[in-house]
């Protein structure tokens, strides 16, 4: 397993191999990332994982500075999980030489809803870095987790609309035994918050069951969830929404593929989760 830090070296390596599957990450890897890597191995002969904490996707007051940088531990975890061909850990100065006047990829209005409404510019930062990484790695396939459902939709839209020659493979959310979606941010939770955190998934499952049983008053389900989360100490409940799973527009009568999405804070940690609902 090579650890490559420069774009030139990555490009040299790329010329020497056949099909490549790519997993972009910001590091601080956990079992959820290992599931993405496992899927990547199934998709192509070679695998590349990038590790880069992307300043452009963090807003003011977000956790860019305290985001854990754990390259050695990440490499060790990948190794014990079967390895990849390359870990690409570029230097910020090389990836963003013009951080002030950087050309950026501007996603459409759907990226300003849900998480985008609370994290202005976040998906522009994500789309920009992902398109740069796609241009550098030139992979055939890239794997993204459904945990970041809106991110996956933005990337899929970017690939479609900009005719990028890469196939996006969505990977199911990895969960702890109690249902909590695996996330690097779970590490910020104290013991009591960690015990409370699976409540997001509990409510997603509750809402899904109700919809499957015929409930179509999505706002009522959301209001019940918000009320319970508040009582349990959650705050800044950014959204509890039922949307069309493909367009991410608010669910309309007759939509068969839905997704319920939640974002809320426990202490200072913002957690997100979602669940798909297939009707009919
Ligand atoms: O999901 C992430 O870890 C990041 O948003 C990504 C896709 C690696 C872009 O920085």
Image (tube, rainbow, N blue to C red):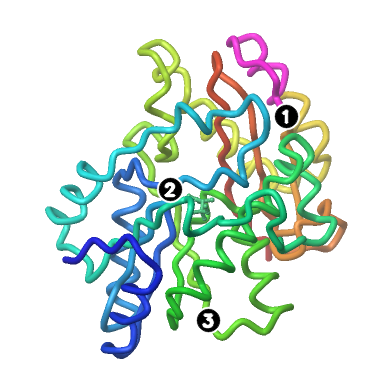
Label 1 sits on residue: 238
The correct choice, above or below, for 187 with respect to 229 in the image is below
Q: Residues within 10 Å of mark 3 (few under 14, many from 20)?
A: some
Q: Secondary structure at mark 3?
A: loop
Task: Name the spot of residue 275 as percent of width and height, x first.
Answer: 58, 48
Q: What residue do we see at 37% from left, 79% from top? A: 11
Horizontal arrangement in the rendering, residue 277 relative to residue 95 (left or right)? right
Q: In front: 12, or 207? A: 12
First along the sequence among labels 2 and 3: 2
Q: Specify whether tag 3 is near ligand 1 (CB below 8 Å).
A: no
The Cα atoms of the two marked residues, 1 and 2, are separated by: 23 Å
Q: Residues within 10 Å of mark 1 (few under 14, many from 20)?
A: some
Q: Secondary structure at mark 1?
A: strand
First along the sequence among labels 1 and 2: 2
Q: Secondary structure at mark 2?
A: loop
Label 3 sits on residue: 166
Q: In front: 184, or 124? A: 124
Q: Specify whether tag 2 is near ligand 1 (CB below 8 Å).
A: yes
Horizontal arrangement in the rendering, residue 268 relative to residue 91 (left or right)? right
Q: What residue do we see at 51% from left, 72% from top? A: 134
Magenta region? 225-237
Q: Give the quarter of the figure containing the C terminus.
A: bottom right
First along the sequence among labels 1 and 3: 3
The correct choice, above or below, for 163 with respect to 7 in the image is below
Q: What residue do we see at 23% from left, 61% from top? A: 3
Tell me, yes or no, whether the two marked residues, 2 and 3, touch with CB atoms within 8 Å. Answer: no
Q: What residue do we see at 60% from left, 22% from top? A: 265
The correct choice, above or below, for 93 with respect to 195 in the image is below
Label 2 sits on residue: 26
The Cα atoms of the two marked residues, 1 and 3, are separated by: 33 Å
Task: Name the spot of residue 185 as percent of width and height, x first.
Answer: 45, 32
């Amino acid at each position: 397993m090579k650890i490559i830090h420069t774009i030139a070296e990555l490009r040299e390596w790329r010329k020497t191999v056949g099909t490549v599957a790519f997993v972009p990450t910001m590091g601080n890897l956990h079992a959820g990332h290992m599931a993405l890597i496992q899927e990547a191995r199934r998709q192509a002969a070679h695998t590349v994982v990038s590790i880069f904490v992307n300043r452009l996707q963090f807003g003011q007051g977000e956790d860019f500075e305290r985001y854990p940088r754990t390259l050695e531990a990440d490499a060790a975890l990948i190794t014990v999980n079967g390895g990849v061909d390359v870990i690409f850990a570029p230097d910020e100065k090389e990836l963003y030489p013009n951080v002030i006047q950087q050309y950026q990829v501007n996603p459409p209005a759907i990226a300003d809803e849900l998480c985008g409404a609370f994290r202005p510019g976040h998906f522009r930062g994500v789309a920009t870095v992902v398109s740069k990484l796609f241009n550098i790695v030139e992979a055939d396939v890239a794997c993204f987790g459904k945990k970041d459902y809106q991110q996956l939709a933005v990337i899929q839209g970017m690939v479609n609309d900009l005719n990028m020659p890469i196939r996006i493979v969505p990977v199911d959310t990895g969960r702890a035994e109690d249902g909590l979606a695996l996330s690097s941010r779970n590490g910020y939770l104290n013991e009591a918050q960690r015990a409370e955190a699976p409540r997001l998934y509990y409510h997603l499952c509750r809402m899904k069951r109700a919809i499957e049983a015929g409930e179509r008053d999505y706002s009522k389900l959301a209001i019940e969830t918000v009320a319970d989360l508040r009582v349990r100490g959650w705050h800044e409940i950014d959204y509890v929404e039922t949307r069309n799973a493909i367009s991410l527009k608010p669910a309309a009568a007759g939509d068969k593929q839905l997704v319920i999405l939640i974002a809320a804070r426990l202490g200072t940690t913002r957690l997100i989760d979602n669940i798909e609902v297939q009707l009919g």
